[in-house]
Amino acid sequence: MEGGLVAWAGADADYVLANGEAPRADDVVLDGRGKTALPGFVDPHTHLPWAGYRENEFNERLKGKTYAEIAAAGGGIVSTVAATRHASVEELTLVTRQRLDRMLLHGTTYCEAKTGYGLDLATERKQLAALLAAAAGHPVGVAPTALPGHEVPLERRGSAALKARYVDECCGEILPALAADGARFVDVFCEHGVFDLHESRRILEAGKAHGLLPRLHADELTPLGGARLAAEVGALSADHLLFTQPDGIHAMAKAGVVATLLPGTSVFLRMNRYAPAREMIAAGVAVALGTDCNPGSSYTESLPAVAFFATIGMGLTVEETLTAMTLNAAASVGEAARRGSLEPGKAADVVLVDGPSLEHLVYHYGVNPVTDVVASGRLVVRDARRVAD
Ligand code: NIG
Ligand code: FE
């Protein structure tokens, strides 16, 4: 690695042949014997700047309530919105940095992260400011997403006119402001009872008009047709997709939309259902994996944990799982030319997994398999300990 990029990749013996010299005296050599080197993991779907926990909802689901019932009773996203509106930008920055720190220890070197717990101009901007402050100088690179279309805020409920006013605010005020503040993507929760296909399309098109690249929460709880919408608006990625039908899969394949699957939510919400990953792969769709780290439907920073659910729950092979959390995840966030594989010229983001073969990434489950992390050519985690900022 040189200058934060991969300079050469291969076996020791070939290094001398290819470069005409043994490693130089001033080279830093990381001994990975007994371990397996993989590209740094890319987490293409997270929600990081939020306050408050919803552990009570976790227990309510165990007693038989569903995610939708809990939300209808005043829990769900709007309860996190209340806590996040009350939090200061400093508090949000601190928790976001702690989440990035945990992601790094579990091998993530690049991620996407969303607003979406503000649902008003001031709080959405506060969330983005906290995210950018937490990411500044952090080894984990962050691509910020504007998600004012995560829910309808309580003060805009009760009539179609009020809801329409919120969609207008998203399109006319909040998205332009977040784009100016540095967001790269626009996202929307396209779901029955949240934003329908028409409203979702308006929000995504408004984001596009301000230079944001569209992606969306699609077909998570009901088969609304979000996958087809993703194809129609030219989204980089459609996410969740538990209820996506064959026509949606084919539309995604044709348009080159990445399927970002989040099987942690299937388990966490006790859905007894996963996205049809095998059908997607068979249709030629690139499948990526994300944590969906958030307080309501999947509270984890660990991509290896999600990898376990991807193999056991969705039947991905270990090789498909690795591709989904590296190169395809990079494609989901428009970074495939720069990251996601160990090739000369790409970011020098490398993870060592404790074990002599790739399978150890998921086979040794329930523990953190990552021991060492190099981010942009710098050794930042050594023997499971953070050694540099
Ligand atoms: O990706 N689907 C909407 N958003 C999140 C859940 C957010 C929450 O429950 O706080 C998701 O599952
Ligand atoms: Fe999400």
Image: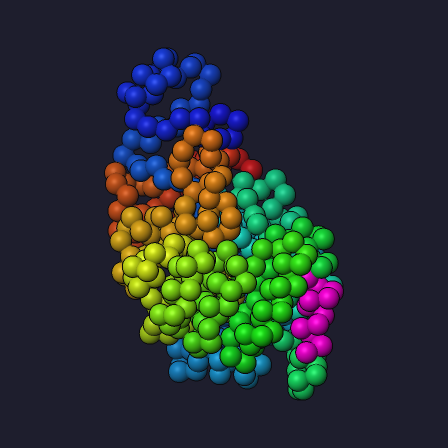
Horizontal side of residue 245 vs 86, given as left or right: left
Q: Residue at x 51, y 51 (%)?
A: 333
Residue at image coords 67%, 73%: 167
Residue 241 locus on image (x, y percent):
42, 67
Q: Which residue appears at 45% of the width and 67% of the height?
A: 227
367 left or right of 387 in image: left
Q: Is the stretch drawn in magenta largely helix, strand or loop? A: helix
Residue 14 relative to residue 27: left or right: left
Quarter of the image containing the N terminus? Answer: top left
> Which residue is the extreme one toward the bottom?
159
Residue 329, position as x, y percentages in the image? 44, 50
Based on the picture, tell me whether residue 259 belongs to the magenta stretch: no
User: Start and end of the magenta stretch?
Assistant: 164-175
Q: Which residue is depicted at the point 25% across and 38% down?
A: 356
Q: Does the magenta portion include 171?
A: yes
Q: Residue furthest front?
A: 254
What x and y, as percent, mark residue 30?
Answer: 39, 28
